[in-house]
C-alpha cells in the first residue's frame, strides 16, 4: 500500500453504492481515505484482487480466434455480457459478447473469473462504457454504447440520454488514471469515466436534465 495514492471505494456520504476515486491519507492496517467528490474522510477496506488468465475463443465472421485474457478474482462474467478481451500475446483488443462459459465442472451461465476455464464469445464492433456522473453530493452510474474506436477526451463534454457532462478523469483497463485536460482514450481501452454533470434548463419551469433523470438509463 505504500505506493498507493488513489483508489476506488464507496463513499458513505455521497456514493454508498457506486465506487468513486479516493486519495489514500493513511496506509497500513487501518486505511484512511478522502473522497475526491465530496471531501469526506473515512476508513476503508481495500482488497487486492488476484490476476487470473483465461482462454477465450472468439467467433469473428467465419473465423475463430483463440487468445488469452487477463482478469481478476473480483470479476464475474455472464452469458450475454459485453466485455473487452485484451490479448497481450498478440497485442490485440477485441470487444465481444459472451456466448458460453466453461468451468472445470460444466458449462454455466455465469461464474467468477477464478472458476472459468474458457470463455466463448462473438466479436462485436461496439462497447459499453461505464460513466460515473457527479452532481453535488450524489453520483449516478450511466452507460454509453459506442464504437470501440470512439474517443473520450478529458475536459470535453459528452451526453447520455438527457444528461450532459464534462469528463474529468478516465480509468483505463490497465488500472491507470488520466486526469490531464486533453488526454484522449479510445472506448475499447476505458474501464470507467468520471464526469461532472453540466446543468441546463430543460423547460420553462427550470427543471434540469438531472432532476428529470430516469433509472438505468443508457444510450
Image: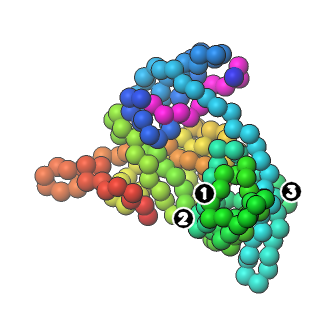
Instruction: Name the residue beneath numbered marker 2.
Output: 146
Between the C-alphas of marks 2 and 1, the distance is 7 Å
Residue 89 bears which disc, if any?
Answer: 3
Residue 73 seen in render: yes
Instruction: Name the residue beneath numbered marker 1.
Output: 187
Between the C-alphas of marks 3 and 1, the distance is 21 Å
Secondary element under disc 1, as helix, strand or loop, is helix
**Number of other residues with Cα within 10 Å of mark 3, as a class: few under 14, some 14 to 19, many 20 or more:** few
Q: Which of the 4 quarters of the picture holds residue 103?
A: bottom right
Q: Position of residue 174 (x, y in %)?
A: 70, 45
State which region is magenta. 2-11
Q: Position of residue 161 (x, y in %)?
A: 37, 61
Mark 3 or mark 1, which has the lower sequence index? Answer: 3
Q: Which of the 4 quarters of the picture holds residue 123?
A: bottom right
For the C terminus, give its image quadrant.
bottom left
Residue 131 bears which disc, if any?
Answer: none
Q: Position of residue 147 (x, y in %)?
A: 58, 66
Amino acid at each position: 500500500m505504500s505506493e498507493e495514492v488513489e483508489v476506488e471505494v464507496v463513499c458513505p456520504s455521497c456514493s454508498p453504492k457506486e465506487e468513486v476515486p479516493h486519495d489514500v491519507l493513511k496506509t497500513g492496517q487501518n486505511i484512511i481515505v478522502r473522497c475526491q467528490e465530496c471531501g469526506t474522510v473515512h476508513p476503508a477496506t481495500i482488497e487486492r484482487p488476484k490476476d487470473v488468465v483465461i482462454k477465450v475463443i472468439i467467433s469473428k465472421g467465419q473465423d475463430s480466434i483463440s487468445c488469452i485474457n487477463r482478469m481478476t478474482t473480483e470479476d464475474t462474467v455472464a452469458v450475454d455480457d459485453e466485455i473487452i478481451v485484451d490479448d497481450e500475446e498478440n497485442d490485440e483488443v477485441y470487444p465481444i459478447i459472451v456466448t458460453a462459459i466453461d468451468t472445470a465442472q460444466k458449462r454455466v451461465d455465469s461464474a467468477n473469473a477464478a472458476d472459468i476455464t474458457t470463455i466463448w464469445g462473438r466479436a462485436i464492433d461496439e462497447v459499453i462504457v461505464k460513466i460515473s456522473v457527479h452532481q453535488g453530493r450524489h453520483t449516478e452510474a450511466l452507460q454509453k454504447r459506442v464504437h470501440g474506436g470512439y474517443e473520450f477526451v478529458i475536459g470535453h463534454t459528452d451526453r447520455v440520454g438527457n444528461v450532459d457532462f464534462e469528463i474529468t478523469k478516465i480509468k483505463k483497463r490497465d488500472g491507470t488514471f488520466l486526469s490531464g485536460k486533453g488526454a484522449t482514450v479510445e472506448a475499447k481501452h476505458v474501464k470507467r469515466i468520471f464526469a461532472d454533470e453540466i446543468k441546463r434548463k430543460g423547460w420553462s419551469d427550470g427543471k434540469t436534465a438531472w432532476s428529470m433523470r430516469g433509472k438505468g438509463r443508457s444510450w
